[in-house]
Image: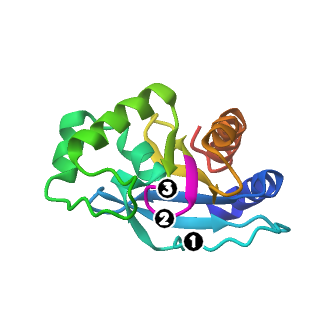
């Protein structure tokens, strides 16, 4: 997968001068797992964040997690998240299942998810789905930057370009 997806994503990461992640759900489905991280080649931004390939992060406070769980019904999400502790990472972290479901409803309408300083301090992220041939979301692609450099509106303005890159990645890995 990475052999075909990386060149497509690398070109986009360089174009937008931001880090791009690929993620999927872990076995419990309450966390994401970062499966790839592509840094822009010639960025001048000093940028340190906690994500790394193989690291897990909670679905309730990551854009990727919100996208991946948005394909499930509210009852399924309640079941998946049952017993999960809603740890507070920042003052913007979602605090309970009701807040999380409210956010999921927005994600379903918008077709993208945002993480605005919810998991890592000073980090903003937009995530979109990568669909398989059955219309299921197996992976997400996220653009991540520092709030210092990028605002939510700027990331939202990238949605059409992100959708195009997602289609190219899906086609390249024989999903669609």
Magenta residue check for 120: yes
Mark linked to residue 120: 2
Position of residue 25 relative to residue 36, above or below, is above
Q: Quadrant of the N terminus?
A: bottom right
Position of residue 82 relative to residue 55, above or below, is above
Observer able to see residue 71: no
Residue shown at 72% from the left, 58% from the top: 18
Task: Check if mark 2's residue and mark 3's residue have beta carbons within 8 Å.
Answer: yes
Give the percent coordinates (x, y) of residue 6: 71, 61
Numbered disc 3: secondary structure? loop
Task: Check if mark 3's residue and mark 1's residue have beta carbons within 8 Å.
Answer: no
Distance CA(mark 2)–CA(mark 3)? 6 Å
Which of the 4 image quarters holds residue 10? bottom right
Distance CA(mark 2)–CA(mark 1)? 7 Å
Q: Residues within 10 Å of mark 1 (few under 14, many from 20)?
A: few
Task: Check if mark 2's residue and mark 1's residue have beta carbons within 8 Å.
Answer: yes
Q: Residues within 10 Å of mark 3 (few under 14, many from 20)?
A: many
Viewer-proximal residue, 132 or 11? 11
**Image: magenta residue range:** 118-126
Q: Quadrant of the C terminus?
A: top right
Numbered disc 1: secondary structure? loop
Residue shown at 41% from the left, 51% from the top: 65
Viewer-proximal residue, 123 or 111? 123
Give the percent coordinates (x, y) of residue 128: 55, 42
Image label count = 3
Q: Which residue is mark 3?
A: 117
Please tell me which of labels 2 and 1 falls first in the chain.
1
Q: Which residue is mark 1?
A: 49
Please tell me which of labels 3 and 1 falls first in the chain.
1
Give the residue furthest to the left: 83
């Amino acid at each position: 997968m990475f052999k075909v997806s990386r060149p497509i994503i690398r070109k986009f990461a360089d174009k937008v001068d931001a880090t791009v992640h690929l993620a999927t759900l872990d076995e419990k489905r309450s966390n994401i797992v970062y499966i790839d991280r592509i840094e822009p080649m010639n960025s001048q931004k000093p940028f340190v964040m906690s994500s790394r390939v193989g690291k897990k992060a909670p679905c309730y406070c990551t854009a990727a997690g919100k996208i991946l769980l948005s394909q499930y019904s509210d009852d399924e999400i309640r079941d998946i998240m049952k017993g999960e502790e809603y740890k507070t990472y920042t003052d913007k972290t979602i605090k309970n299942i009701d807040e999380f479901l409210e956010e999921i409803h927005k994600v379903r309408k918008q077709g993208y998810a945002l993480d605005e300083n919810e998991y890592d301090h000073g980090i903003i992220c937009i995530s979109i789905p990568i669909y398989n041939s059955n219309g299921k979301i197996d992976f997400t692609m996220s653009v991540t930057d520092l709030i210092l450099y990028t605002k939510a509106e700027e990331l939202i303005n990238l949605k059409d370009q992100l959708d195009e890159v997602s289609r190219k990645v899906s086609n390249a890995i024989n999903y669609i």
